Image (tube, helix red, strand yellow):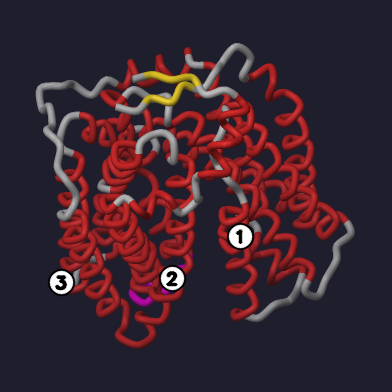
Amino acid sequence: MSQTTSRGEDADLREEISRFAPLRVVGFRWLMSAQLVSEIGDWAARVALQLLVLEKTGNAALSALVIAVSLAPWIGIGQVLASIGDRFPRRTVLIVCDLSRAIIFVVIAAVEVPTGVILLLAFVAGCFDPPFEASRSALIPQLVGTTIYGHALALSAYVSNLGLLTGYVLGGGLSGWLGPQGALLVNAATFVLSSSLVSRLPNEAGNPSRRPDLRAAARFILTDRVVLSSVVIYGLVAFFGMSVEGIAAPYAVDELGLSDVGVGALLAMVPAGTIAGTLAIRADGSDRRLLRLSGLAALVAGGLALPVFGLELVGLLPYIGFFGIGISFVASIPTNTAAGRRIPDEIRASTFGILQGVVIGAHALGAATGGVLANRISLDFAATFGAATLLGLGLLIMLATPVLTSGEDWQVREN
């Protein structure tokens, strides 16, 4: 049944529905629990792998390469792998991905292998991320429907950032206590636990004969005005947000003279800002409201960060600056809501795979751009430029929203 929601009804709906409404859906609770456990294991494993490579080689560059090779599958091959979620039962895909990553980390922990093999296995483990994330994203609207989809995405983003923070702490703490190999064994156990939680979800029938239709997914993105606008908006916000986040560590050391503990605290302010922003917004309503909300996130982020970096403020104020930068990434929630509720189910995983690839690419290019600006000019300039651009971009998005959504009405589609 299809029903158009008017602006007045839309406002009433926002008042009636709690942002925690998705938690009343049993399947969503299992999915979020599995996501939290899997995210903690994923990031803790990356920290443990970095420390293991550093312990074996003493080479910081090779240690940093762990993160790069883990994320590399998202660019190119990841889109093909993500489309698996449109061919096979998505619950099954999630379980296979979790158990496969658990086996890989057990092998790394239990068998003495060369550094090159560790990096190769980290890449292989990373290949299971796109189908896992695309299938998980595709399951959310299946479980909760479209009416509370935005709230479900907000809760998912909160869980993701909580997993990131916990994973970093757990990875470092376990590596110090049990050694990197012991930490990897514990992390493997988190993937096993995640798979057991996912197994409680209802399983839908897959269609193995269906070919990955990335062209149909790409065509849909390019021809749907709201979806394309959402992709472009968050791609730009993520690019400039990462141009500042990417230089947080050198900024902390070179500009502020912070200790290792201080560097960690400064880095933690970015996901802290994202978590706070996630709790502050209501990601529901019309497409126009959602895209304007994404612009507001960029505007607030730039407004908080620009005075700090532009005036080269010190003390506790840089923490506020990076906290503000974290708020910019909240723009992913309203843009994903606007786009996600319009995607046809038969190409949902493939489309999410492409969207995730765009986001990862924007993050990588943004971080690289911030590094280049910092090296060629200065850290202060790079941070100020990123914050100022976010401020201007946020204002532009809010002004352009009526044009970007002209003639587009949100259709609530509930089966």
Residue at the spot x=76%, y=72% of the render?
256
Tell me the CA gap for discs 3 and 2.
27 Å
Q: Secondary structure at mark 3?
A: loop
Residue 356 rendering spot, x and y as whole percentages: 42, 38
Labels 3, 1: front one: 1
Residue 189 appears left or right of 77: left
Helix, strand or loop status at disc 1: helix
Element assignment for label 2: helix
- Quadrant where the N terminus sits is top left
Q: Quadrant of residue 7?
A: top right
Amino acid type for the residue under numbered disc 1: Ala
**Residue under numbered circle 2:** 166
Q: Which residue is label 1 attached to?
A: 276
Is residue 71 found left or right of 5 in the rendered image?
Answer: left
* Mark 3 or mark 2, earlier in chain: 3
Cα–Cα span, label 3 and label 1: 42 Å
**Which residue is rendered at x = 31% and y = 83% of the image?**
179
Nearer to us in this view, 290 or 79: 290
Sort mark 2 into few (<14), some (14-19) or many (20+) by Cα contacts within 10 Å. some
Where residue 54 appears, as percent x and y from the top left, is 40, 72
- The residue range painted magenta reads 55-60
Label 3 sits on what residue type?
Val
The quarter of the picture where residue 260 lies is: bottom right
Neighbours of disc 3 within 10 Å: few (<14), some (14-19), many (20+):
few
Please provide percent x and percent y for residue 5.
52, 24
Reading the image, the residue beneath label 3 is: 111
